Structure formats: C-alpha cells, structure tokens
Image (spheres, helix red, strand yellow):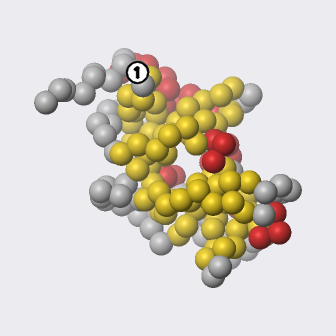
C-alpha cells in the first residue's frame, strides 16, 4: 500500500498510461543498438551498452502480454534500478513513449482491482487517478523475477561486452 506522496515517471504502452517510482529510474535513453541474446525469453530484447555496462533490456509490451509494437521516434529505454533478492540490479525497459514526472498523493491512489484486470495484479501497486486519467502504478520489483534477470545476465555475459558504437 502506498502511504506517502511520491513522484512517478509516466510512460505509455499501447493506450495505457503506466507509472513507476521515479526513485527507481536511473535514466531514459533513446533506443540504440540492442544486441540480441539468443537464449533469452521472448520478451527480452537483448542488452545495451549503458556507460560501459551490458544492461539487459526488456520489451515491456511483451512482458505484459501485449502485442509487439514497432519502435518509433518516441520509443524509449527506461533504465531502472531494481532490488531482486536483496541485490541492486540495473535493467532497461522499452516503453512506447515516456511522458512526465508527476506527484501523486496516497489519497489519489486506489488498490489494484482484483477482477476485470487485463494486467497481473501482482505487478500493480495501485491505480492512480489524475483528472480523468487512470495511471497504472507498477511494482517494477515484482515485474521482473530474479530468475528472469539472472538468465538474461548469464546470456549477456556469454556474449561479452557489446561493441562500442561506430563513430561516424
């Protein structure tokens, strides 16, 4: 349950507006060269080079069971810091577009409905309301299991560090 006013970064997947706690966002990047990881799950896009580190990237649309999207000029990689099994893990999530940082009071956040949700309720911290818009507040630590990340990190290490981008 959310008990204090917090800042959230909002982003879209399809027609839905999502938010994650801004404290978990390290940076937002344009989609760049993503190196495929052959043994990764389908929703795993691959790894990107973030400041010299191979960072796993997840297609959030696929992770949530949506139809695959096409990258556009608005598509972004949200680099997040998660805590999995007590360990800090850096992971990128591909969103259709990133919007703004907003502040939500606990009074404007309801618990996730238990029925009639197309999203897994264990992924959702609450439903924020801002004007007429509903914002699905994600629990990013629940979205990614340590098992998923370990599998991707292992596959990423097998690939070695991504090659630096060509100058040109």
Image position, residue 148 (x, y; %): 56, 36
Image position, residue 46 (x, y; %): 39, 36
Image height of 85 relative to 24, above or below:
above
Image height of 1 relative to 52, above or below:
below
Query: Which residue is nearer to you in this view: 38 or 54?
Result: 54
Image position, residue 82 (x, y; %): 64, 37
Query: Which residue is nearer to you in this view: 139 or 117?
Result: 139
Task: Give the left or right position of residue 88, taking residue 38 as reference.
Answer: right
Residue drawn at (41%, 43%) of the image: 29
Which residue, given by chain and number where applicable, does mark 1 sit on? 52
Image position, residue 39 (x, y; %): 40, 32
Q: Which quarter of the rendering shows the N terminus?
A: bottom right
**Which quadrant of the view contains residue 10?**
bottom right
Residue drawn at (78%, 64%) of the image: 105
Q: Which quarter of the rendering shows the C terminus?
A: top left
Residue drawn at (52%, 30%) of the image: 151
> Badge 1 local density, few (<14 within 10 Å), some, or many (20+)?
few
Image height of 113 relative to 145, above or below:
below
Looking at the rendered structure, the secondary structure element under dot 1 is loop
Looking at the image, the residue that sits furthest to the bottom is 132
């Amino acid at each position: 349950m959310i008990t204090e006013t917090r800042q959230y970064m909002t982003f879209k997947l399809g027609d839905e507006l999502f938010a994650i706690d801004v404290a978990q966002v390290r940076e937002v990047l344009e989609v760049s060269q993503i190196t495929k990881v052959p043994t990764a799950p389908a929703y795993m896009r691959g790894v990107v080079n973030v400041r010299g580190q191979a960072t796993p990237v997840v297609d959030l649309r696929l992770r949530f069971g949506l139809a695959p999207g096409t990258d556009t000029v608005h598509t972004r990689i949200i680099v997040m810091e998660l805590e999995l099994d007590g360990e800090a893990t850096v992971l990128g999530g591909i969103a259709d577009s990133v919007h703004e940082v907003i502040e939500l009071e606990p009074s404007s956040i309801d618990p996730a409905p238990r029925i009639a949700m197309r999203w897994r309720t264990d992924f959702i911290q609450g439903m924020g309301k801002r004007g007429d818009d509903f914002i699905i507040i994600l629990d990013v630590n629940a979205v990614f299991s340590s098992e998923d990340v370990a599998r991707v990190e292992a596959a990423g290490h097998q690939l070695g560090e991504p090659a630096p981008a060509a100058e040109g």
